[in-house]
Amino acid sequence: MPQVMEFKLPDLGEGLTEAEIVRWLVAVGDVVAVDQPVVEVETAKAMVEVPCPYGGVVTARFGEEGTELPVGAPLITVAVGAGAAEPLSADPGPAEGSRSGSGSGSGSGNVLVGYGTDHSRPARRRRIRPAEPAGAARPAATVVAPVPVPAAAAAPAPGPAPAVAAGGPVPVISPLVRKLARDNGIDLRGLHGSGPEGLILRADVEAALRAPEPVAPAPAAAAAEGMRIPLKGLRGAVAEKLSRSRREIPDATCWVDADATELMAARAAMNAVGGPKISVLALLARICTAALARYPELNSTVDLAANEIVRLPSVHLGFAAQTERGLVVPVVRQAQSMNPEALSAEFGRLTELARTGKLAPADLTGGTFTLNNYGVFGVDGSTPILNHPEAAMLGVGRIVAKPWVHQGELAVRQVVQLSLTFDHRVCDGGTAGGFLRHVADCVENPAVLLRSL
């Protein structure tokens, strides 16, 4: 007799207390193996596929896509044990009993708090379609069961796909499409998907945004009300962290213009010899780690409970990255031990993960210093808010040709504005100014950097 096991939303680490269901990866009746991902959720840190620690048959799902669940809330129930994964159809397909953990009551590996995972993933899944007698009662509201399709309706009729029925699943896979619709107040259930089997694509949402809206006369006494956007998920986490930074940290900013002509020439020379390309960001990061070795006060944090400044031994360098989900700050671990080539490779890897929404929570935490290249937005300067609990952030504006006095004569040079925002509790203006001046000296004359390599 199979045993029904309830799998709850696990603790995803880093103090996260809730997650939003983005996409279900299994349906009721599917056979799942131990540690097979069953749902994709979005936390305040990243998009995560959640593996189930039980192998067997999915008997219920809890929560629709778009629902926010707290840690510990039920996700699915799985029937495990003898006969739980035996197909009832005439054609069972390829045998799956040899796969590790499938159809057994054995538990998972490790990783997720309270559950765990290993590296096995099944190549395909089978769905059990139990016979249902005529007039049988529909499953409970929390159980999303497969609906048999009559033979006459098996072939889709020509023409555009109909709008989604109320209460039915929304035919959209991409979380970016969901976000675009959510941010612009578009109800996906009212759209006709142009993709395969009525799948709603980004183009469908953009077409809905371009369509003129019917103008209804407003009551004379009614006042116009703006769009309300919930502060939750990533946006909510960013808002809370920035608010806390402003509440707790007495920050100050200093800045200086620097001639980056020689730095750009040095980068061009490095990339001319072949091998992986080195980015400007990687060179600036290497300059930062060298400057932090001279001014360790800025690689620190304040412990309010103990009323102490904690100087940190390693530089875990965060860098600001703008994505479709919003601003994120991936962290390069042990940046002080990397050369420009290694830094460039790590920046590229983390940027790609950020762009695709696949950063793990651990990739976004633990930073000790942040490098913020707002020059990519075409601006020269900024006074950013510190990334709490860090004590400093270097801002870099655009590198642009400007008139500059060089060797006593007016010339056109590549000029950049550098700014340093710092926690005034960890150091005074002299230390902050010394750090920024050393960074500017290395930008203007990269040979200065060689003394610290």
Image (cartoon, helix red, strand yellow):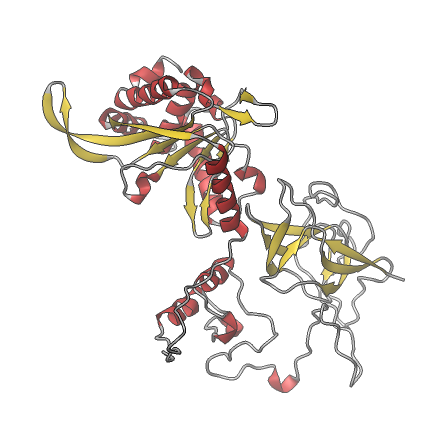
Residue 279 appears in the picture as rendered? no
* Residue 150 on image: x %, y %: 66, 84
83 sits left or right of 415 in the view: right
Q: Nearer the viewer, residue 447 or 328?
A: 328
Q: Is residue 161 above or below residue 118?
A: below
Residue at image location 33% in from the left, 30% down from the top: 419
Q: Which quadrant would the N terminus be assigned to in this image?
A: bottom right
Front residue of 103/317: it is 317
Q: Residue at x 56, y 70 (%)?
A: 170
- Quarter residue 269 falls in: top left
**Residue located 41% across and 46% down the image:** 322
In the depicted view, which residue is nearer to us: 310 or 402? Answer: 310
Dividing the picture into quadrants, the one containing residue 216 is bottom left
Q: Is residue 195 above or below residue 67?
A: below
Q: Where does residue 188 sit, x and y in percent of width and height? A: 50, 70
Q: Position of residue 243 (x, y in %)?
A: 48, 42
Using residue 252 as the reference point, say whether residue 262 is left or right of it. left
Q: Is residue 85 left or right of residue 66?
A: right
- Check the image and report above or below for 155 versus 368: below
Q: Residue furthest left?
A: 409
Direction front: furthest residue: 221
Q: Quadrant of the C terminus?
A: top left
The answer to whether 399 appears left or right of 117 in the picture is left
Q: Is residue 412 visible?
A: yes
